[in-house]
Amino acid sequence: MQPKFSPLTPKFPHLLHGGDYNPEQWLDHPEILDQDIALFQKAHINCVSLGIFSWANLEPQQDYFTFDWLDRIIDQLYQNGIYTILATPSGARPQWLAQKYPEVLRVNADGTKNLFGARHNHCYTSPAYRERVRIIDTRLAERYANHPAVILWHISNEFGGECHCELCQVAFRTWVQKKYGTLDALNRAWWAHFWSHTYTDWSQIHSPSPLGETSIHGLVLDWRRFVTQQTIDFMRTEIDAVKAVNSDIPVTTNMMTHYTYELNYYKFRDALDVISWDNYPEWHKPNSQIWAAESCSMTHDMMRSIQKKPFLMMECTPNTTNWHPVSKLKKPGMHKLSVLNAIAHGADSGQYFQLRQSRGSCEKFHSAVISHIGTEHTRTFREVAQVGAELERLSDLIYNSRTPVQVAIIHDVENKWALDQCRGPRNAGIDYFGAVQNNYRYFWENGINIDLVDSEYDLDGYRLVIVPMLYLFRAGIQEKLRQFVAQGGTLVTTCFTGVVDENDLCFLGEATEEKLSDVMGFWVEEIDGLFDGEENHMTWQNQRYRLYELCEIVHPTTCEVLATYESDFYQDMPALTRNRFGKGVAYHLCATAESRFFLDFYDMLTRQLGLERAMQTTVPYGVSLTWRETAQGQKLIFAQNFSAETKHLPLDQAYTDLLNDTTEHGICTLAPYTCKIVTPQQYS
């Protein structure tokens, strides 16, 4: 029996179903609140996020606070069984604040200062902004932190972006001076003697700019690290303000998908009580529906892995996303499938932006649970209500359940920052995200749970660790991987791994421990960047695979060569290797390979290692199996069909369908865009 996690809040230890609610847009229509509450109840909404963009209504002028309207709304919602996730409003400051304190507006990398507008147009360093945020947060906490309806603090909204003002320059100089101590150390770490760009005074340090310095890659990396640190520091000032009043209310902030790579979200794990994120994939895009499902699932797994416990899906769209290039309607069933996909990967919520559709401005055509029509007589509302009813029914079983994991992918955001600027071997683009997803795909398709952690995490408990294109070695990752393999683990690395240190300085020498050469059993002489459309090939286990983009030329020391290049001047040189090290084994793929190779390769490793699957079966293309486990050891399997075709899943035993209490055996039929949640029949 596995111990359970502590519930997020004892006030409401259940799956959350709700979303962003912006009643401040409707204060001149008091009847709207009554209508909305009645509709919320029909949709099985049990929580709402309030106050995210309400600063101008909460403090219409400096130090004049108007909370009465929020009092009424929180009370009325609570009286009707609906809890509040209360936001701090720092994500969108009011006009008066920017006018009175112009220093709060961000400065771009080219030195231009933003005008008031949009969101996230504020400087995280500004003392004036921090002080005004502290004041409004404290007033909110003093008024609501002990209210029985408030179950969670939602800190700001979708942190992102950066400021290059002089306040931030001073903070950055202080940060690097603390990190390096001396200018000599900084110049060595940044290799600043290149092009005679040596720093001779701390005042010369400036953030990367298209009008100034971008050639010093250590500077660019440290600036990105500073931006993450400064964002977290700003967030902590907000957390401290609300926690000072009542430390029992947990805090979160809603992150965005990892494709932006603006911030290193892994650094947020110690500051927050629970991880949450906003999920907006492009469903039904031609030829990429399954890719979108994989990518979305991979982000869910990343968010769960940050703290290795259940997370919250804080936002998703009930139907269309208005800011996509095409606002495609979700096809029938897709909304339920997308919410249950989050639950399958460890979420304890299904929450939406937005609950009532805005009447004007830039999100007026973003879908909502309650549309402009204002009734329950819409397809979107009916599907949301169905999801709410099913989450309500299954909450006691699913809530706070675990995700057992034996496989990890090292997914390092700082590595992505370094790859983006490395200037070779392919400036036409190195697809780090694609490299990670190619290694993820087999496990997602075949019901094998997987974590995505970065270089700072321990590797204890994993049986297989995958390291795709980890160009930048930092945080002692070499020794972690060395010990993992020596103690019996299986390691897989791919090309362009172990090239530079944490400052983006190339490792020197042939076979060195810095490069992990002892574990891998080879050294890399050079790497060939292939033009688009140019290919090489290798044959492994009687199958021929396409190689493209990057091809390393490696020299074995102790490794066994499993496959070789088919052509070019490095014909017959290693393309796939295996090396025994201690009690374990390390594999290395020397080139970028087609997706089919990874499916075959990880199928072999899964069988060799006996990795636990959701069920022992052959999974049809377009179907994903994911599972969670209750504290009593009961396996909850989510069989999800992301394709537009009916799929037939062979079952390895009899299962109970938890959504309709029927027995599934032999073949499980999955209609397009549907999910079934099943458990082995012995648990029913």
Image (cartoon, rainbow, N blue to C red):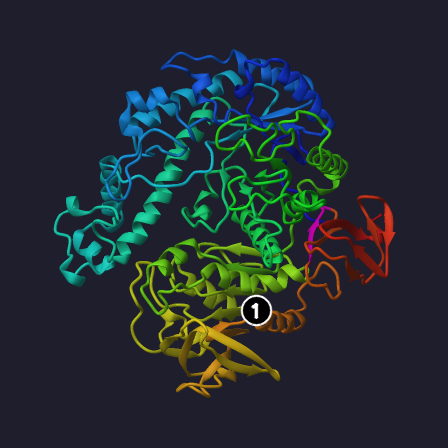
Residue stretch in magenta: 623-631
642 in relation to 473, above or below: above
Residue that appears at 46% across and 83% down: 574
Q: Does the magenta portion include 127?
A: no
Residue that appears at 40% across and 32% down: 118
205 in relation to 407, above or below: above
Which of 187/93 is in front? 93
Provide residue 382's location: percent of width, then percent of height.
73, 34
Task: Provide the secondary structure element on which disc 1 rests.
Answer: helix
Q: Does the magenta portion include 625?
A: yes
Crowding at dot 1, Cα within 10 Å, few <14 / some 14-19 / many 20+, comes out as some
Provide residue 258's location: percent of width, then percent of height.
48, 50
Provide residue 38's location: percent of width, then percent of height.
71, 21
Relative horizontal placement of residue 141, taking residue 355 as reference (left or right): left
Which of 76/24 is in front? 24
Please say whether residue 270 is visible from this viewpoint. Answer: yes
Residue that appears at 38% across and 39% down: 231
Provide residue 642's location: percent of width, then percent of height.
68, 54
